[in-house]
Amino acid sequence: MRIEQKVTVDAPRHLVWEYVTEPANYPVFIDGLTRWRVAGDRHKGLGARYRMLIRVGAADVGGLIEIVEWRPEGDMAWSSVTGVDQRGRWRLRDLGDGRTRVTFRFQYGVAGGGIPAVIAERVAAISLNRRFRVSLLNLKRAVEGQAAELAAP
Amino acid sequence: MRRFVDELQSRLTADLDDRDPDFIRENLSLSWLLATIWFRGEVRDMERIPEEGPILLVGNHSGGNITPDTIVFTLGFNTYFGVERPFYQLAHNLVLTSPVGPFLRKFGTVAASHENARKALDSGAAVLVYPGGDWEVNRPTWEANKIDFAGRKGFIKLALDTGVPIVPIVSAGGQETAIFLTHGERLAKLLRLDKLLRLKTLPVNLSLPWIVNVGDFLGHLPLPAKITVQVMEPIDLDERYGPDPDVEKAYEDVTSEMQDQLDELAAERRLPVVG
């Protein structure tokens, strides 16, 4: 199952990049995140690992994820190591005039196949779509707030 | 006949290796759908469970032979800690000898006995016990919000013997999945079920599709009651009661704390089934 959400942030790309790559921000802006901690020595960057869970329906789902792609101010992608199979990506593009296009992509698969797995994937998508929409709006507010503070005389 | 008896007997032997993490992962989608859509399940404060090491999870449960609180909590534990963490559940012999027995063994269900629980705890696993057993799940509907372990203190002795912390798990809503009328103790005794199958009860409930359901041997279609499960703070009996603990007092304390928690959960519910 693949989910994609986009938002335009009225802030320069480097500010958005700093925000989405800082692990301490995730419990603040990701809606429904019930567990989030850095796993291992690396705080951020390629190879950094995080233990995460997000509330979806009756359960907290997730697992251990690892950053597998890191292109500064461009793309950051992760993949699951344990838990639910997932891949995700932040994709930032400069729109000029200090604005940034943020694309969030999330792919997941429910183990086992069969009819229950197919239904579960689709039911979960309803909840996840809503959570990610709220999360992107949280991100937009937070970064635009930072940009306004920096711009203030 | 001999082969049949041997097969049933083998299902009651605790082989911890029967637990299959891949099988659990592949079947979580079904319990997630059931827990999410049918029971609107909610497990609270899972982070109170220690991250590592053996623990004894002690719960109340409800709903006759179909116990939705077990489905909701087992799903919650497996998704929160991952299927890699060893997790066993103790169940009545009747459950393991039923057609779903082999399925449950792969999920980590073993026959309820002190030896099996000890074996699992010694291996470093998390173990879930329901001391109230078949007695508790068939308590009448008007006792739905009562912790009723029927005086079974085995879990206290087990925690003291092994030195592992107890984490009480309190759930509400399960006894709203049917209308439970009686434990049926007299009937069970009359039919000698206590001797033959370790069954002290022959419960009677009103449920779908049977309407009048005696024994609940084939299960029933549970009403879609909202299930709420609350994880309580761990209790270290050694730390709390010192080197010479009074089992009776420890039992009274733990069950009364669970009762207080259940009262709180019950007070939150505005309507039966709806929650």
Image (cartoon, coloured by chain):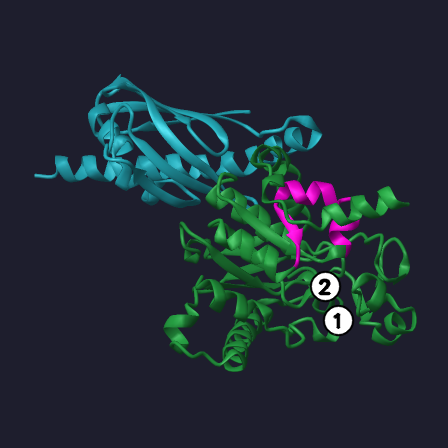
Rendering quarter of residue B105 = top right
| Subunit that carries the residue with mark 2 | B
Q: What color does chain B have in the rendering?
A: green
How many C-alpha atoms fall within 10 Å of the one at disc 2: few (<14), some, or many (≥20)?
Answer: many
Bounds of the magenta span? B94-112
Q: Which mark is residue B176?
A: 2
Q: Position of residue B224 (x, y in %)?
A: 72, 54
How many C-alpha atoms fall within 10 Å of the one at disc 1: few (<14), some, or many (≥20)?
Answer: some
Residue drawn at x 85%, y 52% as measured from the top left: B218
Q: What color does chain A have in the rendering?
A: cyan
Q: Position of residue B177 (x, y in %)?
A: 74, 59
Give the side of residue A6 with respect to residue B269, left or right.
Answer: left
Give the side of residue B76 with respect to residue B94, left or right.
Answer: left
Mark 2, secondary structure of its residue: helix
Q: CA distance from mark 2 to mark 1?
A: 7 Å
Name the one closer to the observer, A144 or B22: B22
Q: Position of residue A23 (x, y in %)?
A: 28, 37
- Is residue B96 rendered magenta in the image? yes
First-in-chain label (2 vs 1): 1
Quadrant (top left, top right, bottom left, bottom right) of the N terminus of chain A:
top right
Mark 1, secondary structure of its residue: helix
Name the one closer to the observer, B47 or A95: B47
Query: Mark 1 belongs to which amino acid?
Result: Thr
